[in-house]
Image (cartoon, grey):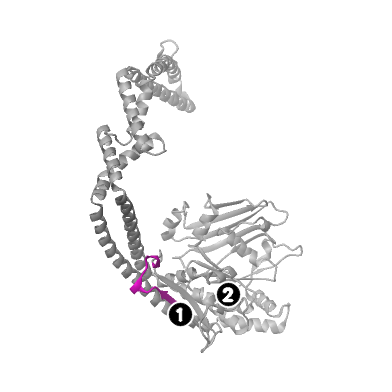
Amino acid sequence: MSERTFLDEITIRSIGVIDQATIEFSSGLTVLTGETGAGKTMILTALNLILGGKSDSALVRKGSERLITSGRFRVPADLNEVFDNYGVEIENNELIISRSVTGDGKSKATCNGIAVTANTLVNMSEFLVEVHGQAANLNISKSSKQRELVDKFAGDPFMKSFVEYSKIIQSYFDLKSRMDSLKKSIAQKDSELQELRDFVSKMEKLKLSQGEYSKIDAAIERLSNVEQLRIAGITTLVAIDDEDSGALKSLSIARHALDSARTKDVDLEAIHSKVSEGYFLIDDARTELATYIHSLEADPDQLDLLNSRKAAIHALIKKYGGDGSLDVESDNLVQRFSQSAETITDLEGGDERLHAMEIELKSIKETLVNTAKQLTKVRTEAASKLSILVTREIQELAMPHTTFSVQVKSVDYSSLKESDFTSVGCDEISMFISSHKDAPLVALAKGASGGEMSRVMLALEVVLAGSHPVGTYIFDEVDAGVGGKAAIEVGRRLFALSRYAQVVVVTHLPQVAAWADSHFVVTKDINGSVSQSDVRKVEGEDRIEEIARMLAGLENSTSAREHAAELLSLKV
C-alpha cells in the first residue's frame, strides 16, 4: 500500500446534519453504517467536495456561515512530480486538501496551504481516489468510458502502441495541412511570389534585426531629451555632492559621529553599519551619475538618422505587417524574412514539392495504418482477457449464469477513409452482458438492472485493481438492489479488492459490513445533528450489536446477535 496514495483522515464541519466529525481511516476495508438520514452519505459528500465536486450552498448546515471539509492523504515520492505540475508541493509525503463553501455559495480550496481551483482538484483526484455511486454506473454505459477501461487494463503494451500511433497521426495531419497550404499557394503563386520577392528585396536593403525597433525607439527618446536629462542629472549630482549641504557630506558627518560611540552599544553598531552602507551606495551613485552626465551629448544628425530608419521600418510594417504593437510586428517581419527562402523554394518548385509530399504522405499513412492495427490487436487481446476475468468475478457475485463480454469493433482496414482515424485509434469498444446461457448479448446500459450494474462495476474494479489500482476506492450504494447470498459475495469481493488498495464503503447491508477491517457507525443525537462523538469506531461486542441492528432493525435481539456473530465469522 505504501506505493500508492492513502486517505488518512477526513474532517467535516457544518455539512448537512453533521455538526463536526473526524474520521481516521485505516488500510483494508472500511465500512460506514448507520440508520437512514444519520449522515453516512454526507461523509462522502464532504469527500466529493475535497475532490473538486460542485459546491452547493444548500449543503451548509442551517445556522452556520460556511461548511469546511479537509482530507489528509499520504502520497508516495514517485508522484511528487505529478502534483508539482499542478503547482502543489508535497511535504513529508503528505497532502492536505481543504475546501470551504459559504452560505451564498462561494467556494475556496487549498492544497498544502496553496490556493487552487476546483478543476485542479478534479484533475488531481484521478491519482487519489476512485469514487463509485449511481453516477459512475451511468458513466460506464458511455462508449468512451468503456474504451478507457479496456485501454487501462491493457497497460504498458497499449501505452507503447498508443504513443507511437499518436506521434504518427500527428505527423500525418501536419503534412496534410502543409500540403493544403501549398495547394492554395500554387493556385496563386505568381502574385504571392512577386509580393514575397518584393518583401525580401526591401528587407535585404533595410537589414532589419530582431529587437531593433525597440532599441531605436529608446535611442530617439534619449536624444530628443538630452537637455532635460542633463538638468536632472546635474541637479541630482549637486544634491549629493555639495560641499556644504550635500547628501554625502551629511552622511560623512553621521558616520564620524557614530564611529567613536558604536563600540559601546551593539545596537549602535548595527545603525553605524547601515549609515556606512548608505554612504558608499550614494558615493557609487555619484560616480555613475557623473559618467552618465558626461555621456549625454546632443547629436542632431544621429537623431535624424534614427527617425528616418524608424519611419522606414514603420512603412514596411504598414505594408507587410499586422495590427499588433510596432515592436512585435517588426520582429514578426524579421521572422517572416528568415523563412522566406524556404517559402520561395516551395512556391517556385510547388508542383514538384507537392508530388514529393504526396509520396511522403503515402508512406506515413502506411505506418499509420500499421500502428492503428497494432492498437486494435492490443485492445482485442485485452478485451478477451477482461471478458473472461470479469465474467468469473460476476459469477462469484451470485450471478452464476451471467456472461460479460467486451467487443472491439474496428474499421475495415482494406478500405480506410481519412475520417476513420481518430485521436484514440480506429476502434469502437462496447460492453455487453448475457443473463443466462442461451440469452443474447445485450448492451450493458440496457441489459443490467441497478443491482446488476453495481456488481458489474465492482467486478471490473476488482479485476483492474490487480494491475492498475488507485490508492483509495470509495463505494456508495454498491449494494443497491442486492440482498441475501449476493450481498455476502459483494462483501467478499470488496474485501478482496481491499487487499490491493484502501476501500471505503457506505452500506445498509450487514452481509457487506461483516467483511470490514474497520467499522464506523454514524448516529444522530436527539436534536437531529451529528457531532464528533456520533461517528464512532465499533469493535467486539459493539460491532456485533451494530450488525444485529442492521439485520433485525431493532436492538437487543438475541437471534440477530447470533446471526451477526455468524456473519462476522465468514471473514475468519
Alpha-carbon neighbours of circle 2 within 10 Å: few (<14), some, or many (≥20)? many
* Residue that label 2 marks: 516
Using the image as rendered, state which of residue 231 and residue 334 is in the foreground. Answer: 334
| Disc 1: CA contacts within 10 A as few (<14), some (14-19) or many (>=20) | many
Name the residue furthest top. 244
Precedes in sequence: disc 1 or disc 2: 1
Is residue 323 located in the magenta-colored stretch of the structure? no
Vertical position of residue 374 compared to residue 291: above or below? below
Q: Which of the 4 quarters of the picture holds residue 23?
A: bottom right
Q: Amino acid at mark 1?
A: Ser
Which residue is rendered at x = 65% and y = 61% of the image? 21
* Quarter occupied by the C terminus: bottom right
Q: Report the side of 62 relative to 427 (left or right).
A: right
**Residue lying at 29% horizontally and 34% vertically, measured from the top left:** 208
Q: Quadrant of residue 567?
A: bottom right
Q: Position of residue 532 (x, y in %)?
A: 67, 61
568, above or below 40, in the image = below
Along the line of sight, which residue is nearer the eye, 72 or 63? 63
Against 563, is 253 above or below? above
Q: 332 or 146: nearer the eye?
A: 332
Look at discs 1 and 2 and give the one toward the viewer: 1
Q: CA distance from mark 1 to mark 2?
A: 28 Å
Looking at the image, can residue 318 be seen? yes
Query: Which region of the structure is painted magenta?
Result: 406-420
Mark 1, secondary structure of its residue: helix
- Give the residue pinned by disc 1: 387
Q: Position of residue 568 (x, y in %)?
A: 60, 80
Tell me residue 130's x, y (percent): 52, 66
Is residue 491 visible in this depiction of the protein? Answer: no
> What amino acid type is highlighted by mark number 2?
Ala
**Residue 167 as seen in the image, left or right of residue 506:** left
